[in-house]
Amino acid sequence: MSMQWDYPNPYIHRVQVAPEHVDGLHHANNAEYLRWCEQAGWSHSVELGLDVTNYQSLDRGMAIRHAEYDYILASREGDELLIGTWLTKVDGRLNMTRKFQIYRASDQALILRGVWQLVCIELSSGKPKRMPQTFKDIYCPAVVAETSHD
């Protein structure tokens, strides 16, 4: 078995499942995956050249308006997880799509797939506003082509 990423060249963020991530069912709590995806998304954005201080100075940010997570397998304390993420759509106006896959490193088992629909907002008002040129210049070239993975 090998990791079958849905898109080429994922940005990979690594996490180790620690005791505080595990719940009464003896596996990583579902809420942890949301945090890990958020960390991966921010880490990828920073690598591309946009961090939270850029968002604040531009009074713009990409906010999640819809998120879906498919939990495929459980992960347990001590597991190393590889979180792959991509931008799969940026319309250059308001909308952006970010996708995720999480694999367990030890056996390359697929743990989770996720997708975020994001919208550009004005931070000061919370209202949707067009992406600034900087967002377009950085996010648009980072988009990978959509492919099917069914």
Image (spheres, helix red, strand yellow):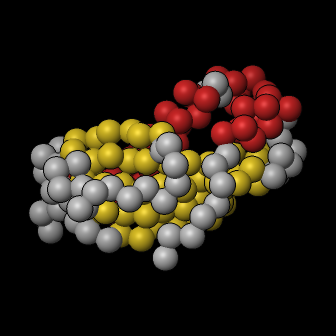
Query: At 79% from the left edge and 31% from the top edge, which residue is drawn?
Result: 137
Q: Is residue 48 above or below residue 111?
A: above
Which of these two is toward me, 54 or 115? 115
Residue 23 visible here: no
Q: Is residue 53 above or below residue 10?
A: above
Task: Quadrant for the N terminus, please.
Answer: bottom left
Which of these two is toward me, 70 or 86? 86
Would you identify the image quadrant in which residue 4 lies? bottom left
Query: At 81% from the left edge and 52% from the top edge, which residue is drawn?
Result: 91
Q: Position of residue 28 (x, y in %)?
A: 23, 58
Q: Is residue 122 above or below residue 29?
A: above
Q: Position of residue 105 (x, y in %)?
A: 23, 48
Query: At 61% from the left edge and 29% from the top edge, which residue is drawn?
Result: 48
Q: Is residue 54 above or below residue 37?
A: above
- How many numbered discs? 0
Left or right of 138? Residue 29 is left
Left or right of 53? Residue 105 is left
Which of these two is toward me, 122 or 54? 54
Query: At 84% from the left edge and 34% from the top edge, which residue is drawn?
Result: 132
Which of these two is toward me, 58 or 37? 37
Q: Position of residue 15 (x, y in %)?
A: 29, 41
**What residue occupies the far bottom of the structure in this picture?**
150
Residue 144 visible here: yes
Left or right of 32? Residue 138 is right
Q: Position of residue 144 (x, y in %)?
A: 63, 49
